[in-house]
Amino acid sequence: MELRRFFVNKEDIVGTEIRVRGEEFEHMTRVLRMKPGYKVIVCADDGVERYCVIRSVDGGEAVLDTENEVRVDSKSVSLTLFAGLLKNAKLDLVVQKAVELGVDVVVPFVSENTVEKKFNAARACRIALEAAKQCGSPWLSRVEDAVTFRDVLSRVKEFDTVCFAYEKEKSVTVSDAAVRGAGKVALIVGSEGGFTPEEAEAAVRAGARSVTLGRRVLRAETADIVGCALLLNALGELDHER
């Protein structure tokens, strides 16, 4: 039987003792009806799987004892996806697939041609949590509240490399822009309407590098997913560790 996976904060781990609280505790005890003696995997967004047994369930928390720890993954790159809001909840799919690929942070934004203006960050975080469990990731991706495109550009200087996916770019590829060894990397992808020429110019002035995702015009949700895959692959983050 496959062991179920739960996420905790690092401060919930003291030595070999782990405390599971909040929504993860509710899922463990109310949904899955786990009791003392059950074995689970606990992750704390650090690349380590902790094989644990439930010692006690009481007072809104479960206390677990760690039996074994295994480092299963490490990261040399942190990727943030700035994704334009999409119609018909299509950003849900983007969040799910971004987590599966290994994106660390997803930041939705509204730009000039964005039609959708509403975003439920709490729902997106739940999708990210379930995606991490489903794909067996020891990392927990973060989804932030929606911001403006101006806010996105104000954050460009936080990163070592920023790729700006622009449909009118014909020559510079993601591989051309990707710099191995860069610790913090970002990708900016627009919504269904794309970017205005003025927004594209502003992005380049802010320090982003305009890149093409290929010879075909992709749907916005496809561009998000393909862009992340191309960038992570160019940075060597999709390879097996040797």
Image (cartoon, grey):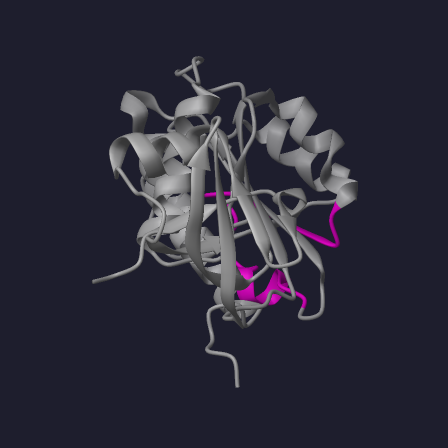
Q: Position of residue 193 (x, y in %)?
A: 41, 26
Figure check: 209 above or below 89: below
Q: Position of residue 53 (x, y in %)?
A: 41, 56
Horizontal relation, residue 95 to residue 155: left or right: left
Residue 173 magenta-drawn?
A: yes
Q: Residue at x 55, y 66 (%)?
A: 175
Horizontal relation, residue 111 to residue 204: left or right: left
Figure check: 154 above or below 231: above
Residue sitting farthest toward the right: 157
Residue 191 in sight here: no
Q: Position of residue 85 (x, y in %)?
A: 44, 25
Q: Residue at x 47, y 23 (%)?
A: 121
Q: Nearer the viewer, residue 15 or 235?
A: 15
Residue sitting farthest toward the left: 1
Q: Residue at x 46, y 78 (%)?
A: 240
Q: Residue at x 42, y 34 (%)?
A: 25
Q: Position of residue 125 (x, y in %)?
A: 45, 32
Q: Which residues are magenta?
A: 159-179
Figure check: 51 above or below 96: below
Q: Nearer the viewer, residue 239 or 58?
A: 58
Residue 152 magenta-drawn?
A: no
Residue 129, by quadrant, is: top left
Residue 116, by quadrant, is: top left
Residue 115 in sight here: yes
Image mark count: 0
Figure quadrant of the N terminus? bottom left
Horizontal relation, residue 19 to residue 131: left or right: right
